[in-house]
Amino acid sequence: MVEQTVNIVSNERATDLYFRLVVRAPQIAPLVQPGQFAHVRILPLRDALLRRPFSIFQVEGDTFAILYKSVGKGTEVLSRMRPGEELNAIGPLGHGFTVPQPGGETPLLVAGGYGMAAMHLLAQRSPQTGIVFVGGRRRVDILCEEEFRALGWEVRATTEDGSHGEKGLVTQPLIAELKRTTAGRKLFACGPTPMLKAVGRLAEEFNVPAELSMDEHMCCGVGVCLTCVIPVKAGDAWEYQRTCTEGPVFDSREVVWEVTR
Amino acid sequence: MVEQTVNIVSNERATDLYFRLVVRAPQIAPLVQPGQFAHVRILPLRDALLRRPFSIFQVEGDTFAILYKSVGKGTEVLSRMRPGEELNAIGPLGHGFTVPQPGGETPLLVAGGYGMAAMHLLAQRSPQTGIVFVGGRRRVDILCEEEFRALGWEVRATTEDGSHGEKGLVTQPLIAELKRTTAGRKLFACGPTPMLKAVGRLAEEFNVPAELSMDEHMCCGVGVCLTCVIPVKAGDAWEYQRTCTEGPVFDSREVVWEVTR
Amino acid sequence: MKSEIRNPMSEAANDARATDLSVQIGSLRMQNPVTVASGTFGYGVEYAELLDLNQLGAVVVKGIRLTPVRGNPTPRTVEVASGLINAIGLQGPGVDGFIQKYWPFLKGLKVPTIINIWGTTVEEYAEVARRFDGLGGVGALELNVSCPNIKEGGAQFGTDARLLSQVVAACRKATRLPLITKMSPNVVSIAPYAKAAEDAGSDALAVTNSYPAMAIDIETRRPKLANVTGGLTGPCIKPIAIKLVWEAAKAVKIPIIGMGGIQNAADALEFIMAGATAVAVGTANFYEPQTALHVIEGIRDFMQRKDIRDVREIVGSVQLPK
Amino acid sequence: MKSEIRNPMSEAANDARATDLSVQIGSLRMQNPVTVASGTFGYGVEYAELLDLNQLGAVVVKGIRLTPVRGNPTPRTVEVASGLINAIGLQGPGVDGFIQKYWPFLKGLKVPTIINIWGTTVEEYAEVARRFDGLGGVGALELNVSCPNIKEGGAQFGTDARLLSQVVAACRKATRLPLITKMSPNVVSIAPYAKAAEDAGSDALAVTNSYPAMAIDIETRRPKLANVTGGLTGPCIKPIAIKLVWEAAKAVKIPIIGMGGIQNAADALEFIMAGATAVAVGTANFYEPQTALHVIEGIRDFMQRKDIRDVREIVGSVQLPK
Ligand SMILES: Cc1cc2nc3c(=O)[nH]c(=O)nc-3n(C[C@H](O)[C@H](O)[C@H](O)COP(=O)(O)OP(=O)(O)OC[C@H]3O[C@@H](n4cnc5c(N)ncnc54)[C@H](O)[C@@H]3O)c2cc1C
Ligand SMILES: Cc1cc2nc3c(=O)[nH]c(=O)nc-3n(C[C@H](O)[C@H](O)[C@H](O)COP(=O)(O)OP(=O)(O)OC[C@H]3O[C@@H](n4cnc5c(N)ncnc54)[C@H](O)[C@@H]3O)c2cc1C
Ligand SMILES: Cc1cc2nc3c(=O)[nH]c(=O)nc-3n(C[C@H](O)[C@H](O)[C@H](O)COP(=O)(O)O)c2cc1C
Ligand SMILES: Cc1cc2nc3c(=O)[nH]c(=O)nc-3n(C[C@H](O)[C@H](O)[C@H](O)COP(=O)(O)O)c2cc1C
Ligand code: FES
Ligand code: FES
């Protein structure tokens, strides 16, 4: 975990909905593990004080990249920043995905929306390729298929309106695939909470291990404020654990879904 | 008085200390009288809410210009804005200088710092030329001498450190000039309060009329908040009047200096 | 033919039915719930060049006392993070000066004028109320019992429930005009004060006035306000004001005019959902004089988007978690 | 020769004399007046990678009660204009959990640890104080009598002067550790509460805790916090906090730790001039973890620029207009 001023190398529209930001962050970039995030201070915000968390999408040399969607005041201001301008980042943060061992389990990645970004580094660092299941509402919600194919992964896309790939939810092709075989397979998922919940249920049903990257609002990003907690099993009961520190990646069997919102 | 979004035409360093901002303001520009100001909302400020008042320096077609010094958060942010970006302005505001009548009194202008900006339009609109007395601490504080000379005015500069023009205070050459003659002459002054006070005293001593543009912090700029008041004679007593509405230009005999800070 | 296809009259009627923004504050009807905060809108006339005053729910004027008031020395305001501290000291022309200078303009407006009044004694409040009762045509009186910027009068009436009752009751006797009591935020719990004002005959509450605050210039080591302390307003106080409105609304049955940092329709709707029947735009007027009009427009848009016909359906509609 | 020209030792000594930043909070000496606000710095260890904790005046930990506390459901925080509203609900490991998990690290620091404690009864406060008294090596105890986010315990102790006295007196009996009473801002006037804490044996006051506040999501019509209301902190409350510190400082002789929206040295100096002997950085840690260190540096720079040798010369040095 390092705090540093980072310089914008590029900040361009990647798809209709997403922007791709590359920053020079020589102290942070080399440390990044798949599933970790950077906590970014967008300095021109001024009256909006908090940092914004973004999964680290790619690492190259002394730079890292994020893929982000303009959804509110922070990301909107960010999308108008130009190369050469400064941000501040703390990273890499959080407990990421367990990178598969060489010859170990075959990874099945399940992603919705910016979840794709969080999984890319995992695909890159995984010694064996697997399948990526990616879902969204419309064609424009499907991100970086090409990047995964370029790494030799199989991509199965679904859209709710059928405008791209199979029509339906991302869990459909996943169920089909799990029905085919579960042996030696492991799920890794990142996306909206309902999707994670569905993946968790499938993991239980099919008895496959699953790691889920949970999406909670954050404040400090480093474990001091206790904003980002989710209910996690603790003996017979449960306790709140921090998404930014014990997570964002949790073993799906640990999450107490009954208590989550 | 009009509120409108204005577009930055140019925003460049005019001197070591001052920037010159030109904005396209078709509704405001044609209405401006000498000594009036624009109340500018610098949108990127966000957590600093208030508008900033600036004297209108020049009017050309549908644009007006201001000359400003970067002294705090607003002017600092302003100095980094680029052509094409938007500001919002309310203007023209305030009760300006009385433009001399053709063949009427000879204007003697006294300016300190950005006071020069406020006087330029007066010089331009005055049917007869006069003398401009301009003072500052150092050479860099002396603004737009050339603009006044180009209008055919005589300029007498003073600096406290003697780095430009006569060494000393702006009132020195003014006193010399008033000693020469006061007949048919009228003072117009804009600058820091101590300078205005000195000019007011000279006006009394030499029994010449004087109009002073007072410098008070402002909030609304249009007369509703009662922030910008100065003590003004009212019968035997005094009352607070608004710099933004009854002023910024007051007859020097009206100001109750004993009560001012 | 044409008239069969489009009847502009009935369409307008439809539209009006589609979004009814009118609200009632005691016997005062407002065409929409958006007014302005006393002291941030002068006497209306100053803004007449910049916006159409007749589109507001009401105009609220700067606090007026029986006699003219000179106000505090300068500096009177200072900008702080997302806010402003002011210590104007209730400068004003007094009842007679107001009637002479400003009333002719205000009474010509199509929208009601609410007059914010204050005094240094219970009797003075009542006397001012009586004078405005006699004037005719006034929309309502707002009792400022919560100005933090003057020693005598103001704040202590708002933080002492017994005095508050006395002021409201005395004004109630002095006039039949709707009475709005402007509450102080500077209390442990607003409920008993809200109740006291209601019980003493207030028709509505205005929540909230400014928060006692201070700023120091570290270079000169002097307070940034000549009055040393002042009242904090603007977006920075919105979350505290929302909570006060929510609590006051639970405590009383009379309507509440919510205010504190409103910059846009979303802010106004937050107040309305918390329990305000109407809202007032204050500090935002200073930097964006059109704010109140944008708020009205934005509330109408919201209602149309959500298919809400009557703004009163939104009042107090916040849903608490089970 | 060389040593005759430059003696690094004596130069360091000179420098230290030139700017003495140390302050005293009861019997606790702090090397500089800058600490952190409880609940915004975890248990120190979380920030150890990002800053050198040993440069702080003290480390202040999150509020601890006798037994573990699960805290409120989420969402627990929401960003507002120049501020934050939180309703964490004092999640914590309890005294035993704290001692086991965090104390080994904290007691290894060169700077003192101040432990923020709370309870739901006077007896529980005293019991927690007794436990930490027995631990050895604790710098001071801060009594949180002003948390707005839990029903039982917290706030009501801070807004009832009698209860406040009882809590402080009971803790005073339970320990000889310096006691800092963390005041509620939610009072008409802070003076009587400050006096009550002083009289009951508090060694210092912490001013101030967060302000009761609320935010509503207008799309869902639900409160933005699961707990409905929360506490407002950050730059938005600074002007109110400065005023409270100024008033508290006039009311008591014991030192005050000022806090509320401090982002930089200028903010800290404003608190010190208002009457605070020390300051704490809170919400700013969340967005700029190095803030406290920058504040220390900035205070030192200010003192050198103004040729001030002892930071205590600045305490309460605001000059009122005649
Ligand atoms: C671990 C993690 C990884 C993330 N990775 C990505 C990513 O790779 N790409 C991407 O586009 N987005 C990502 N997000 C979501 C991203 O943080 C939000 O979209 C962003 O904070 C929105 O900020 P805003 O100012 O534009 O929105 P606003 O709505 O104006 O923000 C208001 C507040 O809510 C918080 N907030 C709003 N939406 C979210 C959200 N979905 N999750 C968490 N906090 C939120 C903001 O941080 C801020 O504090 C991630 C979130 C988390 C927790
Ligand atoms: C009628 C009038 C005409 C002016 N004309 C010019 C001009 O032509 N050129 C120019 O450079 N400056 C002019 N000024 C001063 C200018 O308004 C301030 O320099 C500017 O507001 C500083 O803003 P800031 O955010 O950079 O400073 P900050 O110090 O960060 O501002 C904080 C607050 O103080 C106010 N403030 C600070 N300094 C002044 C000041 N000297 N006068 C009034 N308010 C102040 C700001 O408006 C703001 O509300 C004029 C002021 C007035 C009243
Ligand atoms: C400069 C100024 C002057 C004010 N004068 C009065 C007043 O005369 N009477 C009154 O009841 N409230 C007065 N107020 C308080 C406002 O009416 C309002 O309650 C407060 O500003 C909160 O709203 P806001 O945050 O939108 O400004 C004044 C506020 C400001 C900023
Ligand atoms: C997330 C959060 C948690 C807090 N927890 C505590 C706490 O446990 N005990 C306490 O006394 N104060 C707590 N506080 C209050 C702070 O210590 C401090 O008084 C307040 O935040 C004001 O300072 P600031 O504006 O610099 O944040 C908390 C504040 C925040 C923002
Ligand atoms: S965001 Fe602060 S603890 Fe996780
Ligand atoms: S600045 Fe508001 S009255 Fe002049």
Image (spheres, coloured by chain):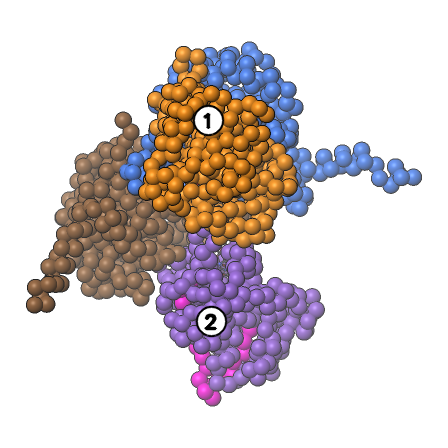
Chain colours: A purple, B orange, C blue, D brown
Q: Is residue B29 left or right of residue C174?
A: right
- Label 2 chain ID: A
Amino acid type of the residue that numbered disc 1 sits on in the rendered structure: Leu
In this view, the residue in front, D243 or A224, is D243
Tell me the CA gap for discs 2 and 1. Answer: 64 Å
Disc 2 is placed on an element classified as strand
Which residue position holds label 1?
B187
Q: Is residue B230 visible?
A: yes
Q: Residue B214, position in %: x, y?
A: 44, 30
Residue shown at the point (39%, 24%) measured from the top left = B179
Amino acid type of the residue that numbered disc 2 sits on in the rendered structure: Phe
Which residue position holds label 2?
A64
Query: What's the magenta region?
Result: A89-110
Q: Residue B150, position in %: x, y?
A: 54, 41
Near mark 2 (Cα within 10 A), the count class, few <14, some 14-19 or many ≥20, is many
Say whether residue A98 is magenta. yes
In this view, the residue in front, B92 or D27, is B92
Q: Quadrant of residue B210?
A: top left
Say whether residue C202 is magenta. no
In this view, the residue in front, C4 or B250, is B250
